Amino acid sequence: MSQQWLNTAEAARFLRVSEASIRRWSDAGLLASHRVGRRRARRFAESDLVQFMTRGETQFIQGQPAVIHVGGVSIPVPSHLATFYSSDAGRLRLTVPFLADGIRSNQPCYLAGSDEMLKLYFQALMNQEGVDLDRAAAGGQFVALALNGATVEMAVAFWEHRFADILSRGPTLIRHVGEMAAVRRMFPSEDEMLRFEQAYEVMCRRYPVAAICQYDVRDFDGVAMLRVLKAHPDLFEHRLGTYLN
């Protein structure tokens, strides 16, 4: 049976994604590719593209547990959760242990929020047993970001590039916390931020990412919360009360 080979542009059309996504997945070892000719151009087997498209939540981590623990609940990887809080103590209850576990396990950890929020996290993480926050930050294992304006497409591409770059160095689990009240200010409107959540939900399934999107219920109305729930279907496989702070 003959094999059909596609170039990068054709593979992107086949999977209905950007050429940049194809290159990132290839570089990260998530999508099988072959190099041909003097220019070492990428070529993709159609059968590999079909397998990539249909494998869903196949785990990419070898030799590591395929689950994490959030609030005492085992969560499979990849996962994209939303948590809800109404106080600073509630903000930190689940996400500080989540990040601390990642730092202790030498897993890449990302935290997106405002400068004020990041200070709260720094203070809490520095008090966690077995966490050397300065060392993790200096080595690039723990990265805190204060966000600036962007489009949905730019934001998704930013995180996809980060995740692919990490995996190109070897298999690992990636932890990601986003403080959505701060992320909201990154976009021109709340609607755009929620569109980003929907796009991130699709994108992150291709990576061994455990993501927690934190929502301060004092900053979002009921309609927004309904859209948040719809953008995080993983929540409905667990006790929702676990994520209410």
Image (cartoon, rainbow, N blue to C red):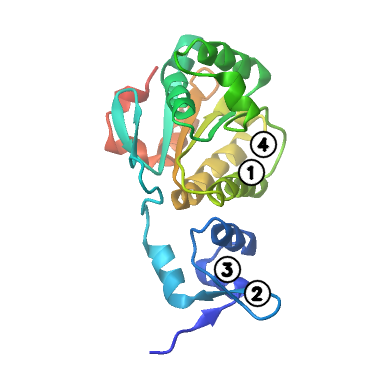
Label tally: 4
Element on which disc 1 rests: helix
State how far apart marks 2 and 4 are (Cα): 36 Å
The quadrant holding residue 235 is top left
Asked whether the beta carbons under mark 1 and mark 4 sit within 8 Å of each other, the answer is yes
Element on which disc 3 rests: helix
Q: Amino acid at mark 1?
A: Ala
Element on which disc 4 rests: loop
Residue under pointer 4: 187
Q: Amino acid at mark 2?
A: Ala
Find residue 91 and report its horizontal and vertical position in percent: 48, 17
Mark 1 neighbour density, 10 Å: few (under 14) some (14–19) many (20 or more)? some
Find residue 126 and report its horizontal and vertical position in percent: 54, 13
State how far apart marks 1 and 4 are (Cα): 9 Å
- Work out whether mark 3 precedes mark 2 in sequence or the reverse, and give the earlier one: 3
Label number found at residue 41? 2
- Work out whether mark 3 precedes mark 1 in sequence or the reverse, and give the earlier one: 3
Direction from residue 220 to residue 115 in the image, left or right: right
Residue under pointer 1: 155
Find residue 179 and report its horizontal and vertical position in percent: 55, 26
